[in-house]
Image (cartoon, rainbow, N blue to C red):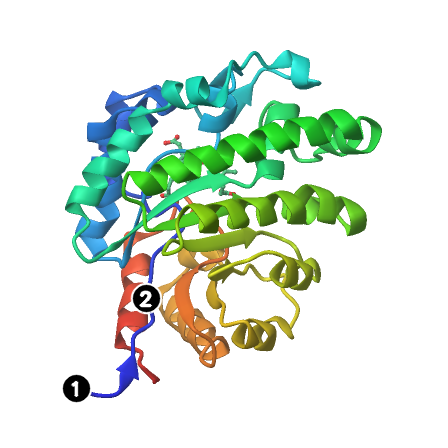
Amino acid sequence: MKNVNKVPIWFMRQAGRYLPEYMEIRSKNPDFLQLCFNPELASEISLQPIKRFDLDFIILFSDILVIPYALGQNVHFLKNHGPSLNCINSKKDINYLNFKECLRKISNIFETIKILSSKKGTKNLIGFCGGPFTVLNYMIEGGTSKTHSKIKKFVKEKKKEALDLLMIVTELSIEYLKMQIDNGANYVQIFESWAGLLESDEYIEFIVKPNKLISQEIKKHSKGIKIIHFPRGSRTNYKTFAEEVYCDVLSLDHSYPQEMLSLLREKNVTVQGNLDPKELLGGAKKVEEKTKEVLEKFKSNNHIFNLSHGILPKTKISNIETVIKVVREHETPK
Ligand code: CP3
């Protein structure tokens, strides 16, 4: 055998609307959240990209907004509009009972994980949750927002309430991840998609602290589990994050500072990323070129190939195949 390493590969949103087999199931299941709570269909959807592309990681099919749902908020996904939640302003507006009760409401997800775990073979199985601030963002904004004005105002003007709610979301997320691990996930990813909204002290309090607590509690619960963090858009704060928060893998978008790569080598943290999903809307030649660029950029780090954000619905399947082919043909010396 040659003395070489292969770069493992998966894609954020690998099970989704660009896949005709997903659309087929989705067309018969108009309620997206109920689809997430259907273990048979959710496990089938999670495995669709594996069957088609033989990727190295299975990610649970679900959504980060099951946590506000478990806390008693109304959550709906409207066609061509994204999520919609009733607006809240403080801790009093959520009528959660206790974490056990909350998790019971979404316990079908653990059944999905059990099914996936029994079928995973040698693949890795990723469980996930949203980063607490990102979940709070949707809870306060009531959906997808361009300006994020409500959450920014909430953090500035009602900091105590904001931190109280953030702590509830953090603690519930920890219990939720532990249950995913107990049912068979061997990786967890924390999607802090809106980390880039905050700076300085707010970044420390709302991004670093809760993510750090999640890592600590998950490692305490289960040493062997691998933790992937994704504080998207953190720019120079990516460094602060890596210095403060335990990560086995750090997912990078395009905002990270150059010195990150040597810092992550020193800390023995694997880099995940970071092909721009927009590249997958173009031609094959460019896709091949850009994929090679990513492999070259991270060649001195431990690397899991991925995108800098989720696959877009208009992505051509042939472009996904091109990326996989280039990554599979690539070998790095041990
Ligand atoms: O990656 C995967 O394949 C696993 C499943 C997964 C979904 N959402 C399924 C989904 C994961 C890991 C997520 C995470 C998620 N959900 C995030 C963090 C990552 C990111 O994208 O920043 C966020 C912010 C959400 C919230 C969310 N869910 C939004 C804003 C939307 C609507 C807009 C959009 O991007 O599609 C969703 C819907 C959603 N979640 C779909 C899927 C497959 C599309 C639903 C459909 O079929 O209509």
Circle 1 SS class:
loop
Q: What residue is rendered at 29% in x and 74% in y?
A: 6
Q: Is residue 190 above or below residue 331?
A: above
Q: What residue is rendered at 66% in x and 49% in y?
A: 208
**Observer-nearest residue: 218 or 67?**
218
Residue 176 x/y as whole percent: 43, 33
- Number of other residues with Cα within 10 Å of mark 2, as a class: few under 14, some 14 to 19, many 20 or more: some
Q: Is residue 302 left or right of residue 109?
A: right
**Observer-nearest residue: 277 or 4?**
4
Q: Is residue 68 left or right of residue 54?
A: right
| Residue 32 numbered mark, or none | none
Which residue sits furthest right? 157
Residue 252 x/y as whole percent: 54, 61
Indicate yes or no: mark 1 CB to ligand 1 under 8 Å: no
Quarter of the image with the N terminus in it: bottom left
Residue type marked 1: Met
Mark 2–mark 1 Cα distance, whole angstroms, equals 18 Å
Residue 105 x/y as whole percent: 39, 18
- Number of other residues with Cα within 10 Å of mark 1, as a class: few under 14, some 14 to 19, many 20 or more: few
Provide the residue designation for mark 1: 1
Q: Is residue 160 above or below residue 92?
A: below
Q: How many marks?
A: 2
Circle 2 SS class:
loop
Q: Is residue 328 above or below residue 247?
A: below
Q: Is residue 87 left or right of residue 181?
A: right
- Residue 17 appears anywhere in the view: no
**Observer-nearest residue: 227 or 59?**
227
Indicate yes or no: mark 2 CB to ligand 1 under 8 Å: no
Where ligand 1 lies, by quadrant?
Answer: top left
Provide the residue designation for mark 2: 8
